[in-house]
Image (cartoon, helix red, strand yellow):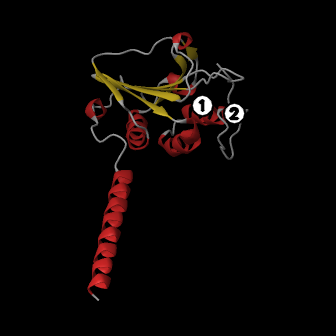
Amino acid sequence: MEQTRYIYTVFRFMLTVIACGLLAEAQQAKQIYNPDPGVLTSPIDGSTVVRFYYHPRNANRYVYPLVLRVAAANDERMKVAPVLAEGRTVHISLSEMQELVAGMTRSIMMGQQTKGVEVLEDWQMIPVTEVMDVVVIFSKGAARGAIPTKDLCKTLGALDSAIKTPRAHWEFQRFRLYYGCRVPGFDDAKYNDD
């Protein structure tokens, strides 16, 4: 009888240890990607810039980095998407940029952060990447993160609703398509490259 009670107690103890371990693991999985946001708490203003770039070694085509900048609602740049030195550049409203950056901080690990003014390098100088490189430049610093290849479509798809400016939204969806993501209802002929 005493031996049965001992075995039962040991068994309950082992179950408790396993349950605590599973709870701790589940709690860790629930944590947000950027528990120490640092520069990510900087104010988002007209100087905030976001760039997405992915060019794997075995790519069969080159896709320009997609750069998003802030512009006023009546700004003519909201209607075009030229390829500039830093990549294909589109403009969105300040509220869209705020929503986009908030979504990015929830879904992308922004592990590298710097303080001080930064600028985007020329797209021709960006090295080949095995993950999507994501950069957010604020007036007081920058944050860089990565989206693993297996998560590209899910992560970018979750950010899609933040962009409402028609041309910028179309370019973002086209950018997603280049990487094999499904974009239902996308009209490839809606705009031309300018």
For residue 165, above or below residue 53: below
Q: In what element is the residue under mark 2?
A: loop
Say which residue appears at 58% left-offset and 41% top-offset.
153
Which residue, given by chain and number where applicable, does mark 2 sit on?
190
Residue 165 position, x and y percent, is 52, 36
Please, which residue is most extreme toward the bottom here? 1
Q: In what element is the residue under mark 1?
A: helix
- Neighbour tally class for label 1: few under 14, some 14-19, many 20 plus, Cα within 10 Å: many
Residue type, label 1:
Glu
Say which residue appears at 58% left-offset and 40% top-offset.
150
| Quarter the N terminus occupies | bottom left
Residue 159 position, x and y percent, is 49, 42
In the drawing, does residue 184 fall left or right of residue 128?
right
| Quarter the C terminus occupies | top right
For residue 23, above or below residue 15: above
Disc on res. 171: 1
In the drawing, does residue 163 fall left or right of residue 56?
left
Dot 2 or dot 1, earlier in sequence: 1
- Neighbour tally class for label 2: few under 14, some 14-19, many 20 plus, Cα within 10 Å: few
Q: CA distance from mark 2 to mark 1?
A: 10 Å
Disc on res. 79: none
